[in-house]
Amino acid sequence: MRKDAQQNRDKILATAAKLFHDRSVAAVSMKDIAAAAKIGTGTLYRNYPNKSELCLALSFDFIQQFITTSQQYLTETVATPLSQFQQVLAQYLAFREQRLQLLTAIENGPTIMATYYQSALYRQLVDLFKRVLAPISGEIDVATLTFRADMVIAMLKSDSYAYQRQQQGLSQKQISAEICKIMVR
């Protein structure tokens, strides 16, 4: 990538992050981002065809950091398999809560989820959950284990998570406990 193109991408991401922090993801338009970054809307749309793609780019590092931190924890811990699952799940819930607006924008994007599900990042997330689910799942085949990992992630998509937190009034700890009841054999 050309240096000026990378500078534009960096400027767009920094500007969007500031605007999203100051207002909210929903309250900021692509036009707002272009104006605040002092770039043309064409430049913005060439880099990020929609707000969902922009939010994914902003979230990529956060998701990768969660995966890396969790993998490091699993390498270093002597906790029981159930405690490992509970810890990774609790950290994932905390991550989702902190980034709820960005993740909602990604998940509600017109085409982004299909792309995300095919990404190496999503496969890493599934592999992380497979790693903590395998020891607590009894004897199951790889396809079933993969399905379970996918379903843990799907259960916690932003709309479902927000519903459980806001409408049902469940705490992160309660959500974690209910998921454990479903997933642990």
Image: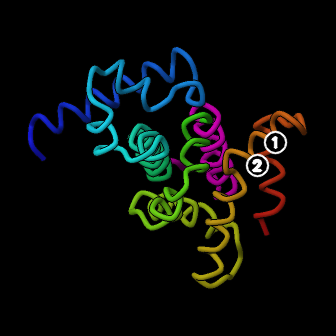
- Residue 185 is left or right of residue 127, and the answer is right
In magenta, the rendered stretch is: 77-99
Mark 2 belongs to which amino acid? Answer: Ser
Instruction: Name the residue: 34% across, 42% down.
Output: 45
Q: Which residue is mark 2?
A: 160
**Residue appearing at x 76%, y 64% in the figure:** 183
Q: Residue furthest right?
A: 168
Give the residue displayed 62% in from the left and 52% down from the top: 84
- Color encoding of the figure: rainbow
User: Mark 1–mark 2 contact, CB under 8 Å?
Assistant: yes
Q: Amino acid at mark 1?
A: Tyr
* The stretch drawn in magenta includes residue 180: no
Towards the viewer: 171 or 7: 7
- Compared across the picture, whether 154 is left or right of 176 comes to left
Q: Establish if 18 lies above or below 180.
A: above
> In the rendered view, does 173 fall on the left or right side of 56?
right
Where does residue 174 sit, x and y in percent of width and height?
Answer: 83, 41
Looking at the rendered structure, which numbered label has been put on residue 163? Answer: 1
Give the residue drawn at x 76%, y 37%.
172
Point out residue 156 in the picture as x, y percentages from the top left corner: 69, 51
Secondary structure beneath dot 2 equals helix
Say which quarter of the image contains residue 65: top left
How many marks overall? 2
Whether 46 is drawn above or below 185: the answer is above
Predominant secondary structure, magenta span: helix
